[in-house]
Amino acid sequence: MVKIAVLASFNMDLVMHVERAPRRGETVQGVFATYLGGKGFNQAVAARRLGAEVAVVGRVGDDEYGRRFLDALDREGIDRRAVVVDREHGTGVATIVVEPDGANTIVQSPRANWAVASDDVTDAAPLLAPADVALLSRETSDVAAVTFAEAMHTAGATVIFNAAPVVDRAVPQPLLRLPHVIVANELETAAVLGIGAPGPGDMGTVVASMHGQGIGGVFVVTFGGRGAGAIEGAREMHVSAFDVPVVDTTGAGDAFCAGLAVALAEGTSIEEALRFASAAGAVACTREGAEPAMPYRTEVEALLAKGVTR
């Protein structure tokens, strides 16, 4: 069984399903639900359900939300020995508005996620070192992200940096130089590379910007319902999105990243990994919420066998 290490973020998702998003100054009514979420948590759960052994490092608050996350990690069989219970900062929270077509907007308060320290990662290094692939995003502190990327790179893991979410601070250079794979959607790609948001036909612009900034490795761009593209050296590739009934896109990108991580850990090519990841992301769109929507291996394999794309 392959091993995945995740720099985990934990956000309790407070979700409103609405007929339409409110305009500025307007109140609309909707149906409320809560779900466990956070990019790192979602990715860890999805990787585990897709067949990997998973260990996480991160922080939750000393509160009800934090206890629910710890219980969920135990329930999924994820190694949480490196998850710190923060006595000062509460568990992260996200408010999510979901429209009828599954599109969403999110406002997040990271709280304990931003308190993840370099020492947290360093202390967890012996636990994380055996990983084949390491996953991280921008939902924790930058210092923790850099320390994690450096430690896992040194340990010999394939490092995947999910450059999400877009935040009002520059990406630390080590997070562009160390990872073997960078994953971003159109808006995140624009923010990372300083270009206009690319479409599936604009991968040449991505290549030029990567080379101009000295970014090596593989750059993956996700386009939602229009599939995903990747740059590997001089090679460009694209996979189509799977045709599924979209209920809620929350967590789809996290399922994609987990699928990519598991497939690469299992030794597949980038193109094969993209297809597996695309199927994992598609399955996540068919259910409400983040953690409940994370896909199982059997579901992804069934969709791959069906092979219906847009």
Image (cartoon, rainbow, N blue to C red):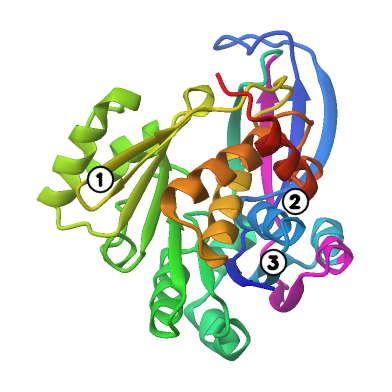
Q: Nearer the viewer, residue 10 or 26?
A: 10
User: Which residue matches tag 2?
Assistant: 297
- Residue 10 visible? The answer is no
Which amino acid is tagged 2?
A: Arg
Question: Which residue is painted at 80% across and 65% down in the image?
Answer: 73
Which amino acid is tagged 3?
A: Ala
What SS does tag 1 mark?
strand
Question: Which residue is painted at 52% across and 76% down in the image?
Answer: 117
Q: Where residue 262 sits in the image (x, y, percent)?
A: 60, 60
Q: Is residue 219 above or below residue 99?
A: below
User: Which residue matches tag 3?
Assistant: 52
User: Which residue matches tag 1?
Assistant: 235
**What number is the disc on residue 56?**
none
Part of the protein shown in magenta: 71-99
141 to the left or right of 62: left
Which amino acid is tagged 1?
A: Arg
- How many angstroms separate mark 3 from mark 1 (CA)? 29 Å
